[in-house]
Amino acid sequence: MTTLAFCPACGATAERAAPFQCADCSTWHYANPRPCAGALVERDGRVLLLKRAFEPWLGHWDIPGGFCEDGEHPADGARREVREETGLDIELVGLLGMWMDTYLDDDPPITTLNVYYLGRPIDDRELTIDTDEASAFEWFGPDDPVEPIGFPTHFPGVLDAWRAIRSGAQPQVLPYDERFPTDTR
Ligand SMILES: [Zn+2]
């Protein structure tokens, strides 16, 4: 929960948790989760994970992804983040689900809404990781242990969703933009 000590609009003492309306200047203040998007990139039955090169979760395995830009559909955000972090162009073949989490390194911590897709590289090119973002990469099979794992609040659930699809226990859901094409730009 985000508590504001002062009204950012007029500076009046607030000490209130958003949402609230400033008693002095009547400005409304909101606090909403930040949308994030990522993709489990699958090749030959294995998925690509990156070892984080920065905090939070430095040195832990992570799924390629990041914060959505303003007005960006999460599907576009997932493809963009994968391209930036790995050099791979992917097509999205499934929606794995959405998970809430907290990004603890921000003060105050922010909540995130994380949308994850299943994707596949569109060609056979080798990947080139952005060393500002990741120190290593590896392709993991469904039974390979992922240690140490970053973002433990939601990451294991994303892997489980992928394993469930792979084992046939759960039907694959098409990505939203394939079923309901939209153009918000
Ligand atoms: Zn105010």
Image (cartoon, grey):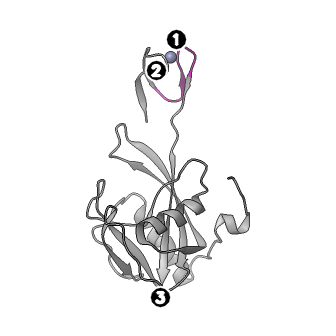
Q: Position of residue 18 (x, y in %)?
A: 50, 29
Instruction: Give how far apart the Cα atoms at labels 3 and 1 are.
Output: 60 Å
**In the image, residue 93 above or below residue 109:** below
Instruction: Give how far apart the Cα atoms at labels 2 and 3 are.
Output: 53 Å
Instruction: Give how far apart the Cα atoms at labels 1 and 2 are.
Output: 9 Å
**In the image, residue 16 above or below residue 99:** above
Would you say 149 lies left or right of 66 here?
left
Dot 3 amino acid type:
Asp
State the mark number for residue 24.
1
Q: Is mark 1 on a helix, strand or loop?
A: loop
* Residue under label 3: 44
Q: Does any portion of residue 116 appear in the rendered image?
A: no
Dot 1 amino acid type:
Asp
Dot 2 amino acid type:
Cys
Q: What element carries label 3?
A: loop
Q: Do the residues labelled 1 and 2 touch (CB within 8 Å)?
A: yes
Residue 144 sits in which quadrant?
bottom left
**In the image, residue 75 above or below residue 15:** below
Q: What stretch is highlighted in magenta?
A: 17-27
Tell which residue pokes out farthest to the top in this image. Answer: 24
Residue 96 sits in which quadrant?
bottom right
Q: Is residue 157 magenta?
A: no
Ligand 1 neighbours mark 2 (CB distance < 8 Å) = yes
Would you say 176 lies left or right of 11 here?
right
